[in-house]
Amino acid sequence: MSEYAITVTNLTKRFDDITAVDNLSLEIRWGELFGILGPNGAGKSTVVNILSTLLDPTDGSATVDDHDVVFDPDSVREVIGVCPQKPAFYPHLTGEENITLMGDMYLVPKDVLKERVTIMVEKIGMEDHIGRRTKDYSGGMIRRVSMLMALINDPKIALLDEPTVAMDPKSRRAVWEYIRELRSQGKAIILTTHYMEEAQELCDRVAIIDEGKLVELGSPAELMEKHQAKNLEEVFLKLTGKKLREEV
Ligand SMILES: Nc1ncnc2c1ncn2[C@@H]1O[C@H](COP(=O)(O)OP(=O)(O)O)[C@@H](O)[C@H]1O
Ligand SMILES: [Mg+2]
């Protein structure tokens, strides 16, 4: 096993006249919680979708657990859990049924699956809602269940695309704790977010991207020190002259 769980090398993705990812290079270590931070449209989901083998790059390459995403997508899919930005559910099934169905598809043994679901649901604070149909869930509940669906196979690598959007502070904390626990198990985790305080609190290192380009890379503390900024939002502002958070 190499030192890096994920490598991204001169990765570029163009859609017609839009360059969503522009010559991006990153290396993510095992046991690292790596944040991809940037405003809406920065290219975060496109990176995650390429690493998930859902999109092919226009140029450059990426490996996941040493498997090339273009040439060996099946091996990549075996080691990743993906929490997509737009979660997909069977709305008439309960949260528990959706997670269990996913576990069945991954051939997780029945007894292991049942126990795993119980433990995960408790950790993420969904005990009271897991028996309800997902069609009645709030945005935050949907995301929490979607995360458990992504992780039911106990993947070595987790790709979490804005997992805490639309979550109340308590749920967000529960998700953060859960993500920290995944890291302590030695997994590599990519987390995309446009919440700078989330990246700052949670991530070992962050790549700040804007218009598909890497603008900074380092630990939150390093970046704040280097740019004499009190938080990552200010780092972004100093680098791009733009605010990270969209005005609502
Ligand atoms: N399938 C697609 N077709 C055309 N343009 C796309 C597609 N997916 C993303 N884009 C564009 O690529 C850019 C980056 O999008 P995305 O990766 O979703 O950003 P983020 O996740 O950071 O908000 C945006 O300008 C977006 O409109
Ligand atoms: Mg996105």
Image (cartoon, grey):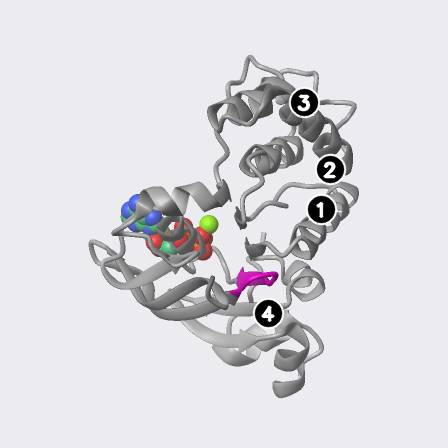
Neighbour class for label 1 at 10 Å: few (<14), some, many (≥20)?
Answer: some
Real-space Cα distance between discs 2 and 4? 24 Å
Residue pointed to by mark 3: 114
Residue highlighted by disc 4 = 205
Quick check: 135 above or below 112? above
**Mark 1 = which residue?**
178
Q: Looking at the picture, which amino acid does disc 3 mark?
A: Lys
Q: Earlier in the sequence, mark 3 or mark 1?
A: 3
Crowd class of label 4 (few under 14; some 14 to 19; many from 20; radius 10 Å): many
Task: Kindly state the secondary structure of the residue where label 3 is placed.
Answer: helix
Rounded to the nearest angstrom, the CA distance separating label 3 from label 1 is 19 Å
Q: Is residue 140 covered in magenta?
A: no
- How far apart marks 3 and 4 lie (CA) works out to 34 Å
Q: Residues within 10 Å of mark 3 (few under 14, many from 20)?
A: some
| Residue 241 on image: x %, y % | 51, 77
Q: What's the mark number on residue 44? A: none
**Callout 2: CB less than 8 Å from ligand 2:** no
**Residue under pointer 2:** 124
Q: Looking at the image, is mark 4 or mark 1 earlier in the sequence?
A: 1
